[in-house]
Amino acid sequence: MEPAWRQQGRGRGRSQEAQGERSRPPQKEKPQLAGGVGGRPDRQLGVSVQSKFEEIRKSNQAAAQRLVEISSSSDDEDDYDDDDEEVEVKVANKDGKRGKILASTFTTYTDQTGGDATGLVRTGQYVSDLFQSGALTCLICIGSVKRTQAVWSCSSCFSLFHLPCIQKWARDSAFLVSSITDEDFGQKLHPWPCPKCRAEYPPSATPNRYMCYCGKLQDPPADPWLAPHSCGSVCQKELKPTCGHTCLLLCHPGPCPPCPKMVSVSCLCGKAKPLPRRCSNKAWSCQQTCSKLLPCKQHTCTEPCHKECSPCPRVSIQRCVCGREEAERSCSSPRWTCPQVCGSLLSCGNHTCEVLCHDGACPPCPRSVSRSCPCSKTKSSLPCTEEVAPCGDTCDRPLSCGKHTCSMRCHRGSCETCRQEVEKECRCGKYRKLMSCHKEYLCDSKCPKTRGCQRHQCRRKCCPGNCPPCDQSCGRSLGCRNHKCPSGCHQGSCYPCPESVEVTCSCGSTVLSVPCGRERSTRPPRCKETCRQPPSCHHPSRETHRCHPGPCPPCRLPCLLPLPRCSHTCPLPCHDQVLVKSQQVPLAGPWEQPSKPAFVQKALPCAPCQVPIPTACFGEHEVSPVPCHRQGRFSCKRPCGRPLTCGNHDCRQECHLVTDGNKCDVCDEGCSKPRPPGCPHTCSRPCHPGNCPTCSQMIRQRCHCKISMLYVECTKLTSADQQLKVKLGSCNNQCPKELSCGHRCKQVCHPGVCAEKCQQKVKLRCPCKRIKREFLCALSDQCVVQCDDACRDQQRKISKVKEAEQRAAQEEEEKKLQEELEAFEKRQQRGGRRSKRRGRREEGEDEAGGGRRRWWRCVALVLVPLGGALLSVAAYYLLTS
């Protein structure tokens, strides 16, 4: 928003053109679409232009969507619901919550008054308005005051304003007053008024913090169980009129209620004994006669007990101040003067007093003091009976022009007007002219300056520069857009509209008073009366529901109109006015935004009758309910099931009606009668009545051992017993299967598992493999061959040979270790300084000797065990042979 000194008289009533110019976004520079600039081809240029166009279109759509969301969002939390039951529940819950908050706020007061809340009517109205949708409006911006916004409350009228709005209002008000009245602009501190009640606040009282109502807590949090903008603690403000007590309510808006304390006070006249009274209503009358002496000092007060006596109402005859006249007058004003001149002889004895009725001595004679001639140059002391004559000198008294003196002789009376010719300057200082001194020179030039309103020119002839205030009316549209400013033409913003508008519900029973201009954005108040709008469908009356804004919800009563071609009625909900989506108009190009689908109310026809009628199907398989509009026999979609001419199968067609021209099909399937047990072949004849002929086909199968392929007549196989079936399935060869012992089965080809009793002989040896014996294979698991004494002697000999070989190997290893130790000790005993060559030679000999020793050690490790093994084998064969 522009500062006040740049608005040039445009307040809230400035023209729509100015608003349009200020709200119009800055235009971007158009890109230069030169085809060959910079070597960029036309195709890339077209793509870039299209991409920019898409970006601008998307940003415009997003801005429009945000605007729609902001305009459609709710300023408060009480939204209307289409379902009446839900609306009633929500209203009951909200009323209950509001009642709890009000009760908690007023508890400390009602505890003092014994439940009497008559003194809380005004304060309760302010608190109730906090919860009423649209009841609280900032008169500066004409916007709703929400519970989460920082506010400021006027201490005189208790109106709520947004904190940023009242801060700007205070700055602009002080600025405008300073710019008009101060010679040194901005040097003085001017008060600023409340936008509603015009109560003035000093500059130091400009709000700069968001405080609760009682001023104890800064930035009070939004608590749903407290009044909005309240800290929840006790108010404790001094009550008005001052009685020494503080407010007992919780932090609240509006004025504090009357003091509920009990005090002991006497009556107004002080005659009765003190009685306990409410502090806010402690003045009481004992109704006894006052009897106090009135100021007239003649009568006493006859009124009942009161605080201060009124003037005496009686009438009496009283003399004036000079005592000449008497009149019947009120006792409350005993001193009065008559219209007669005093007329008493003064102290000079020559003149009389010319003063009207007075008391006391008359003043001295005015002609008895020292007097002078008319021009005051000559003084003389003459008796009061003689007149002072003119002195004959020039008068020289200053004339009315203030610049020249009177040139006549001393004379009585006033001097004449100045008639000297002087060069005079006009009032505005533009022109000069020779003219009489007593005349005022005004030129015909009109002042081009702008008056204090900064809207109109002065246009006064010969203006000296102190242009008068603008005498025209402001006439600008106020923020409400309904009225014009009635004040005189002024600078800056106009005061908010003082009018209030009543917003009513649909039926007019409930009324909500809101500031003028707020009625367009304020929701109608909730009304508990029944909706009175006439029905818009064929029903005689609507469903009972509460009064609501906008159109009534769709009728949900049953239609009950008679249906055609049957005797039933339509059971569906009323469909006289149904919202139907209208057809969308195709877009002419990408520059058009797709519009939201429009809905049109239409009367839809009744749906076909759905009353179920019991009806049998064509094949009489079932009796099912069929909708009335489809009444008649039907197909149940099951197989027909009627027997065919073959006598073995049923009709497989879908349930159908049998007539002379539509009979069941002829059976075209093969014979499906059961075959003899074991016969895998089918009957070669088509489906027929009676028994099937004997099967003459051969069956190909393998023998029991699964090696040979046999061919057997199907009739013999199916009619044979179990023993003959086993014989027919055998190839009469030896069974090729192996027994668990590893020998081949000796039986002829047979079914099942082979017998486990093997009759073949096997050889068993003792553990040392020296003794060998023969047994039957079936009994080999139960027989064991034990070693004898000869076997044990042979084992001992072999163990002794092994021990000798191990000892020889161990001695050889110890001998090698001893040799290496001796060689190491010899190298240590040599000591001294050896030549470099000798040292290298010895090291080489040592390395060569070490390599040979390692070689012989490896050979010994391989040959010693090999020799032992050969000796043990030789010993074994010698002993066994």
Image (tube, grey):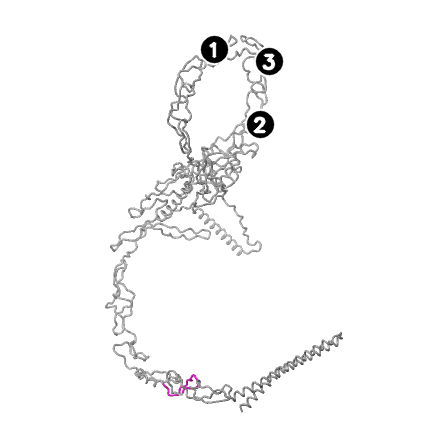
Instruction: Tell me which secondary structure the magenta stretch mostly adopts.
Output: loop
Q: Position of residue 558 (x, y in %)?
A: 29, 51
Tag shown at residue 429: 2
Asked if the magenta segment contains residue 881, the reply would be no
Asked if 107 appears above or below 297 in the picture, the reply is: below
Q: Position of residue 568 (x, y in %)?
A: 26, 54
| Foreground of the two, 94 or 355 | 94
Q: Secondary structure at mark 2?
A: loop
Tag shown at residue 377: 3
The reply to whether residue 641 is visible in this rendering is yes
Tag shown at residue 343: 1
| Foreground of the two, 499 or 719 | 719
Asked which quadrant contains residue 745, the reply is: bottom left
Disc 1 crowd, CA 10 A, few/some/many (<14, 14-19, 20+):
some
Q: Position of residue 147 (x, y in %)?
A: 45, 44
Residue interval drawn in magenta:
730-745
Amino acid carrying mark 3 in the image: Lys
Disc 2 crowd, CA 10 A, few/some/many (<14, 14-19, 20+):
some
Cα separation between marks 3 and 1:
33 Å
